[in-house]
Image (cartoon, helix red, strand yellow):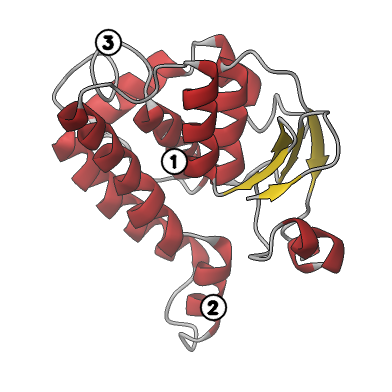
């Protein structure tokens, strides 16, 4: 975390980035307006010096708000939760651990291996035996099967209100749809995602809605 000079809320993101998508949802839930500054991951803009100065990892999202510069989507979401009282993490330690486990199942298990730079490296070094779509379908489906097994049939991922786990889920389902993953085996996941996508903050954060 570094100090940002501007008091304007700015989000440096890429429209199809799952991590950026999560933060757009959280900003919407917080009722915040922000200036979106696109960082073209396909063109490699995240590795340009002016962006690395914002985030030494050369990743998106980066958020500037409250005089701070924040990175890593889940850290940003937790900051917004704590400072805007969003209720995205339960007060009870056991329940909080449960929500984090659901969130991490997507953000730390599915997402990293389906990150574009990882998938590109794997396909480029497979001597033609793996293509991008097959890679994505395999790992997204496997991860969602595990996630489906973690759900208890509640209205949302945990309980009857939106949590951090729901914020992680919707961008992952978007990616699954993009890569034509068969979602039939995941009825609980599909039902929750459909319910969430009707909420204004989720609608406003969609890649298409975000101006792309």
Quarter-wise, where is residue 40 in the image? bottom right
Residue 115: which numbered mark, if any? none
Q: Residue 160: which disc?
A: 3
Question: Dot 1: within a 10 Å radius of its alpha carbon, few (fewer than 14), some, or many (20 or more) residues?
Answer: many
Q: CA distance from mark 1 to mark 3?
A: 20 Å
> CB of mark 1 within 8 Å of CB of mark 2?
no
Name which residue lies at 45% across and 30% down: 167
* Secondary structure found at label 2: helix
Q: Secondary structure at mark 1?
A: helix
Which numbered dot is residue 121?
2
Q: In the figure, 126 relative to 132: above or below?
A: below
The residue at which mark 1 appears reads as: 172
For the residue pair 156 and 174, the one nearer the viewer reads as 156
Which residue does the image show at 70% across and 24% down from the upper left? 209
Residue 144 screen position, x and y as percent: 28, 44
Label 2 neighbourhood size at 10 Å, few (<14), some (14-19), many (20+)? few
Residue 185 seen by the camera = no
Q: Are marks 3 and 2 in contact (CB under 8 Å)?
A: no
Q: How many marks?
A: 3
Judged by depth in the image, the label closer to the viewer, 1 or 3, is 3
């Amino acid at each position: 975390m570094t100090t940002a000079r501007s008091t304007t809320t700015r989000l440096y993101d890429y429209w199809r980035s799952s991590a950026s998508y999560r933060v757009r949802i959280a900003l919407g839930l917080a009722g915040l307006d922000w200036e979106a500054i696109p960082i073209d991951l396909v063109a490699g803009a995240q590795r340009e010096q002016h962006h690395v100065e914002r985030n030494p990892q050369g990743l998106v999202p980066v958020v500037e708000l409250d005089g701070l510069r924040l990175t890593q989507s889940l850290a940003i979401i937790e900051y917004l939760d704590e400072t805007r009282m969003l209720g995205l993490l339960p007060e009870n330690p056991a329940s909080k651990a449960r929500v984090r486990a659901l969130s991490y199942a997507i953000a730390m298990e599915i997402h990293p291996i389906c990150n574009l730079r990882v998938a590109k490296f794997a396909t480029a070094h497979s001597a033609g035996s793996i293509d991008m779509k097959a890679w994505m379908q395999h790992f997204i489906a496997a991860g969602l099967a595990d996630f489906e097994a973690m759900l208890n049939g509640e209205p949302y991922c945990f309980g009857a209100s939106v949590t951090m786990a729901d914020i992680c889920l919707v961008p992952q389902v978007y990616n699954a749809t993009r890569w034509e993953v068969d979602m039939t085996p995941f009825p609980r996941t599909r039902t929750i995602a459909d319910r969430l996508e009707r909420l204004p903050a989720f609608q406003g954060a969609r890649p298409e809605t975000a101006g792309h």
